[in-house]
Image (tube, grey):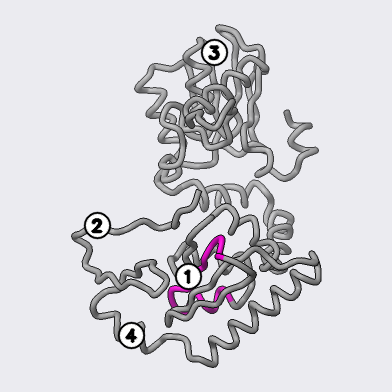
Amino acid sequence: MKYTTRGATTRDSPYNLIYHPWGNPLWLPLDGILLFLLTSLSPENNMKLTHLLNTQASKYVSKHGSEPVAFAVHTPNWVTIPVGEGAPIFELYLRNQAGVRAFKSLNKLQIAEAYIFGNIDIGGYLIKAVSFQGELFSDRNIWIKTWRHLKPLLLGRKNCNPSWIAKHYDSNNLQLLAADSDYNTYTPGIYENDEDSLEAGAERKLEFAFRSLQLKPNDSLLEIGCGWGGFLRYAARRQVQVTGITLSQHKKQYVENLIKENHFNAQVHYHDFFSWKPSKKYDGISMMGVIEDLSDYPRVMKTI
């Protein structure tokens, strides 16, 4: 499937539509056109960017013995730099100087952030572009990785986890836009064929988990990282008493409203897993898409 990652704007948009030579529109404020033209890449910078791409392509050939998949890079001043043989499978659009700087860094984090802020865009086969990024870009954020390990040692994991979780999940539940509508699951489902919906995959997964835990009416379930209450509501509807813990205030509020509206026999607590002191034993424990965020696997299993 081929598509562009950012859709068209509405007819009421205050932007002018400029069609690039490669056919993809760029929206610019009327008063920003002059600034855009003044900050376009110079021919010298275009040559540097071309040299960078050629160097990376040569490294790929040396490593794999073949040309990389064909793609194209489009600069802010409408110069197209092709890479590989044949028609491009995907295309990178460097929207401005910030996008150019991020791309020239060859750093995955900087490029990802540039994409999020709209400084880089991707057209064509997105999945292929993402799968190919490991061949061109690095992830050598040494200080970030070092601090990630040092911080919990210096400050304690209990003090680090809340801010780490909140940074990703306390986003006014924006993630629900990409989740199924029945259970709001945020982890992969179980699909039998390509035509299965998100809802079918989610329910099949939850049914599998429920059956695997051998839960029955009046049993108790501890759900570690209860998300938006997907498994909580599945189990509660089958007369299981559910206790959920989360480190996201936004999720906690969402699940509390869910419990109240549906009169579930359930409760949710804002609490860190490593400091959670349950008052009883549970008939089942679930942690879907959570253990990879806890990172201390031996301690997790010992605690459970």
Q: What amino acid is found at the position of numbered circle 1 in the picture?
A: Tyr
Depicted 53 relative to depicted 223: above or below = below
Which is nearer the N-term, disc 3 or disc 2? 2
Disc sitting over residue 35 in the figure: 4
| Residue labelled with disc 2 | 10
Image height of 89 relative to 214, above or below: below
Q: What residue is at 55 percent from the left and 52 percent from the top?
A: 163
- The circle on residue 240 is 3
Residue sitting at the far top: 217
Magenta stretch: give its range.
87-103
Q: CA distance from mark 3 to mark 2?
A: 47 Å
Task: Give the residue type that dot 4 points to.
Answer: Leu
Q: Is residue 98 magenta?
A: yes
Callout 3 amino acid: Val
Instruction: Tell which of 102 and 280 is nearer to you.
Output: 102
Q: Are marks 3 and 2 in contact (CB under 8 Å)?
A: no
For discs 4 and 1, the disc positioned in front in the rendered view: 1
Residue 234 pos. (x, y %): 50, 19
